[in-house]
Amino acid sequence: MTNIHAEPFTISVSDAALADLKNRLSRARWPDRINGIGWRQGTDRAYLEGLVDYWRSDFDWRAQEAALNKFAQFRGVIGDQQIHFVHERARTGSGLPLIITHGWPGSFAEMVKIIPMLTDPEAHGGATDDAFDVVAPSLPGYGFSAPPRQTGMNAFAIAEIWAELMAGLGYDRVLGLHLNYIPGSFQPPHDPSGQDITEEERAFLATRAAWVEEEGAYGSIHTTRPQSLAYALNDSPAGLASWIIEKFRSWSDCEGDVERAFTRDELLTNVSIYWFTQTIGSSMRLYWESRQRPLRFAPGERVRTPCAVAHFPKELPLPPRSWVERVYDVRRWTKMPKGGHFAALEQPALLAQDIRVFFRSLRGAAEGQVTHLA
């Protein structure tokens, strides 16, 4: 490594923290519910009771901790922000650099399946020449990255940190941008009268409005009063699991059964990272920060970097290609046959293959360039 002070990092949760978690789970207070309501008013109590019982009695954090520690992890300071990241080099020793970023309510643990597919493609149905050096950081205030100590840690500030991180690792140029989600605040410029919006784009706006009406309450809390909610979720592991896993169910291609898309161990590893690091509050604050400085484009402003979009069918409302092309240089648009918001964990093979194909067309450019995935 060059130009960044980073040290190897090993996850090591104390026995006392594990005992405290089990004690709290054993004393969970269950709220009243209407019989037969299921998931219609939020997380189903019967499902959560079973999951909490498994978390307390059968979930093996030490096994999950050991599995995560097989990846080369580091922590470094960029500016005044401590960042945790995985840095796995191509098995061949020569790979195209790629930074892959999770969102809320995920963590770097979402990437455990896809990282080997990208660093060692030959072992996963790909070609040796498609190998990547993969950097998978934890967002500031998520998991093992320290919470920001002042306001202003928005998506733009994080992008600058990621650029410094990659440069510090010896990767100093951007080659391409691969996306499987575009934030809901994304508003490309258009005629204020709305006359230049296509019928497909109008349909998207209607779909997004309906989704916000039905599913968007969590985001309203995160963008306005995240701290009030943080007290409850930071104090109750059952409450934390309820808040996070309801989203994994709603945003995945699982037909209402979250364990069709993810195993209990995968779900609880992610929740446990939030619990042990006490970062649920700082993670939600990113929504508040995004409200202060949302993703907006001025008339004529464009992202010049070549871009690909992988559209998974159960993803949150995604703008149509025409909308995205108003500001992005879209070179590839793939409609996936299955999958949802947590694509790297839910459908890693489909996502990895799309990444390989897109960057294969760009690999003829200068060596040593950085590739981005969000």
Image (tube, helix red, strand yellow):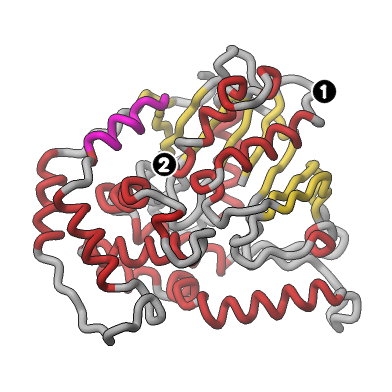
Asked where in the image residue 98 lies, by quadrant, the reply is: top right
Q: Is residue 6 above or below residue 296?
A: above
Locate residue 181, reporting x and y percent: 63, 55
Q: Is residue 34 left or right of residue 252?
A: left
Residue drawn at x 30%, y 29% as measured from the top left = 10
Q: Is residue 29 above or below residue 128?
A: below
Q: Which mark, residue 346?
A: none
The residue that mark 2 highlights is 109
Q: Amino acid at mark 2?
A: Ala
Mark 1: few/some/many CA within 10 Å (<14, 14-19, 20+): few
Asked where in the image residue 150 lies, by quadrant, the reply is: bottom left
Q: Which residues fall within the magenta stretch?
A: 62-72
Looking at the picture, tell me which residue is in the foreground, 76 or 23.
23
Give the secondary structure at mark 1.
Answer: loop
Q: Main secondary structure of the magenta part?
A: helix
- CA gap, disc 2 and disc 1: 31 Å
